Amino acid sequence: MEMFNNVVWWINIVVIILVGSCFVFQLLFMALFFLKPRRYKKAEKFHDFTFILRARNEEEVIGDCIDSCLKVDYPAEKKHVVVFCHNCSDRTAQIAREHGARAIEIFDDHPDHQKASYCMYHGMNELKKDGEGAYEYFLFIDADNQVDRNYLRACNDAVDDGVELGRTFENSKNLTDNILSCMTGLWYARDDRFACRGRSALGFGCVMNGCASLVKAEYALSWDAMSTSDDIEFTINRLLKDEKKVEYIDEAVVYEDQPTTLDDIFKRNSRMGNGLNKLFWSKGVRCFKMFFKNLFRKDMDRGTKFTYLDQFFNLATIPAAFLAIAWFPLYYIYTLIWVGIQGPLMIYGLGTFGLRWFLLFIVIVVACCYIVPFLIQPFVSYLAEKKRLIVTNKKVLWSSILLFPFFMIINAIAIIKGILTKPKWQKLKRSKTKVEQ
């Protein structure tokens, strides 16, 4: 048993190194949260934008979303709304048309096609029939979203300054409905504040988000992202196929409806975990190879080169989370029981370690790698973005910040469930909260 304990000790050290290395870039962006993102020059002309809404039985919210898109401060002839109604059995298409949008009804009952990527694939094929040059830029948002009145002007400045792929600021319209919606909203605020701003300041590409994205039409019309995480797959495809990175547009704000139940959090994060895990093995490893292949290319900017490496590590956090949850609890429970019963554990070349040492080690690791970072991030995110976040209940806000580490456990479990199962695109419960502008 002494030899066995030594072997698993060193396996544990290797797992710590592997898991820790996957979060190197996240730690970097966390340390550089104070950096300012790229700013765009004032546009000299108005570009043409078409909002794309994917919907399945969204009659409760689709009208408000369309109204929000059409009320933005932008020339009427340069803004349009198209709704892809995917296997809808309610009045979604009818309501969309009544509110001034074009509704494309899609019927595909194939059991393997019940996901948002096929909705986008079929919808884009319909738009291609309108002919070359019919569309300039698409803006992807969800059927339950609302957009800021300045949304299109901010996006217009970005595209006039050369942006072809963009991610906008993902805010929450129901941040303090309850603790679950608040923790989810703070997670996205953290992502915008830490990851997106840091990437933008350093010239790295961001990760596209399905409900807060800008895409030049030529890239979207031939839709090639068919996984359950099609937004991130689309990001990776543009990097691998077109050498294009996603720019961050901080001043364009979209308000998303956050889940308010554990069931909805599991539905969304399980689907995400399933898709991202598959993407890591199919395309993430290719990003790692492409980083070294392009490292010394003089015709590629440094930010794009490091985006390959960043995207590899970004996708790697999913299998890393799976490995951490599968290994660490088993190892440390086993070790604590062994040391508690048999006495100190002797590791060749290092010395002898007793129960007190292992308990202290676990407490320090959990505090340094889990509790402290995940208390600091939502707190700093709130303070930094408080002018943009809609807080109607301070008690819910501060409770959510204090409980945020537990939210990360919920996220991790949901992601693991997604890796081990085959989740489908399911409708989430919609909040009735609206953003008044």
Image (cartoon, helix red, strand yellow):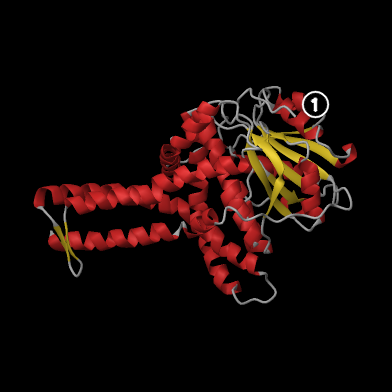
Q: Give SS at disc 1.
A: loop
Which quadrant would residue 12 be assigned to in this image?
bottom left
- Please tell me which residue is depicted at 57% across the width and 41% down the height of the picture: 383
Q: What amino acid is labelled 1 in the image?
A: His
**Position of the C terminus by quadrant:** top right
Q: Nearer the viewer, residue 163 or 400?
A: 400
Residue at image coords 19%, 50%: 356
Tell me if 1 is positioned left or right of 408 in this view. Answer: left
| Horizontal arrangement in the rendering, residue 140 relative to residue 381 (left or right) | right
Q: Establish if 26 lies above or below 127.
A: below
Tell me the quadrant of the picture where the N terminus can be found.
bottom left
In-image side of 252 versus 277 (left or right): right
Q: Position of residue 320 (x, y in %)?
A: 42, 54
Q: Is residue 228 visible?
A: no
Residue under label 1: 99
* Residue at 59% from the left image edge and 74% from the top image edge: 295
